[in-house]
Image (cartoon, grey):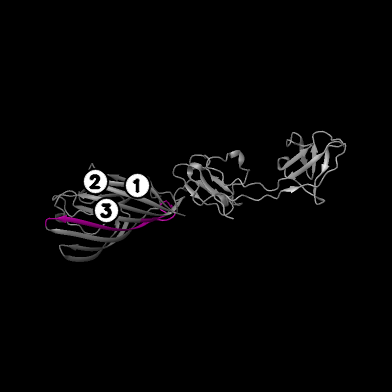
Amino acid sequence: MAYIGKIPTVGNFQKCDAITESSTATYNLTVGSVAVFPETANNCIVSLNGVIQAPTDAYTIVGSTIVFNSSLTSSDVIDFILILGNVLDIGTPSDATVSTAKIVDVNVTTAKIADDAITLAKMAAGTDGNLITYDASGNPAAVATGTSGHYLKSQGAGTVPVFAAVAAGGDVVKVGTGSFTSGDPTTVAIDGYFNDSTYHFYKLFAMFQITDGSSDTNPHLIQRINIGGSAQTSSAYDWWITEGRLSSGTGYVAGRGGANAAYARAMGSFNATQTDAGDGNTYWVGEYEFYKPQDTSVNKTWKFDSTISAYHSAGAWTSKDNGGASYASTSALTGLTFLWENGAGFEKGYWTMYGYKI
């Protein structure tokens, strides 16, 4: 038949077989001569001498036996024992009615937690800066907090990553840098960057902004090596430059060189009248390469490439130069000094030296 509301659960109610009383408190429970096992004393209705007995107070259930709180006599009569099998389902608990104490430990399994349901607020507090990873057993593990500037370093499978400091430099290391933006010096020394115990090859990048005036006659940028920090002026330089120049639309290519000179040129020809537009209109950019400059068993040799551009009222002028030079001395080289052959100065300068590890 149909029901309004919850359908009741039908219980398996059983009346136990008649019991013969004797001078004991414990009696076997059977139904149809088969032992039965009530769930608790509360699942039984017991009538003794015409009186319904109170569960647990007057009797208890132990397995398939009933134990009265005192021994009966032959004059006592157990009227009946009714076992209440199934009871009504309690249904779904109301909201906020199940306490933490009512949940059996480890019974909230992964399957009971919805995906994306655990928020940061629900996670246990940790250490500031730590990261969460997994160890070789697949268990959560913490990556200890690093120091500012550290990077996260993998240590391979089976080992928790760590924060580690960035290794100092690589195979190419910036060994020095310098600059000036005032003073209009007439010489520029780039010195003190060589260390052949760590590096054999070096590369220098430099840029000079050149001052010039109409009183300067055909200035040329020249170079001298430094030994012990001092520019060498002996007539022991050999040099060669291949120059390609474009001036006011006219191209020009030439080779220039010198032997047993007091310097080596760092550029080809340069006409002062082409830079009379004033300060800041002429730039020289150079790239130098050295090999074992501190080696005291051979004379000093180096190569260079450079470009110089000037802008003036008559038009633009650009020269591209490739060259090399040597100096007849086995003394350790400490740097280079740049200066103008015929009077020009330097308005600004920037340079950086790199060393290539052995």
Q: Nearer the viewer, residue 354 or 238?
A: 354
Residue at 16% x, 59% y is: 316
Residue 163 visible, this angle: yes
Task: Give how far across and how far down residue 40 sits, in percent.
Answer: 72, 42
Give the amino acid at mark 1: Thr
Mark 2 or 1: the one toward you = 1
Highlighted magenta segment, given as a residue range: 289-313
Q: Nearer the viewer, residue 347 or 75?
A: 75
Q: Nearer the viewer, residue 272 or 250?
A: 250
State yes or no: discs 1 and 3 in contact (Cβ < 8 Å): no
- Which residue is denoted by mark 3 in the rendering? 222
Q: Nearer the viewer, residue 38 or 256?
A: 38
Give the amino acid at mark 2: Thr
Mark 1 or 3: the one toward you = 1
Instruction: Report whether 57 appears left or right of 144.
Output: right
Which sits earlier in the primary sequence, circle 1 or circle 3? 1
Task: Give how far across and how far down residue 239 sits, in percent.
Answer: 30, 59
- Which residue is denoted by mark 1 in the rendering? 177
Judging from the image, what secondary structure is the residue with disc 1 in? Answer: strand
Give the amino acid at mark 3: Ile
Instruction: Report whether 151 appears left or right of 210.
Output: right
User: Mark 2 to mark 3: distance in Å?
Assistant: 11 Å
User: Mark 2 to mark 1: distance in Å?
Assistant: 20 Å
Which sits earlier in the primary sequence, circle 2 or circle 3? 2
Disc 1: CA contacts within 10 A as few (<14), some (14-19) or many (>=20) = some
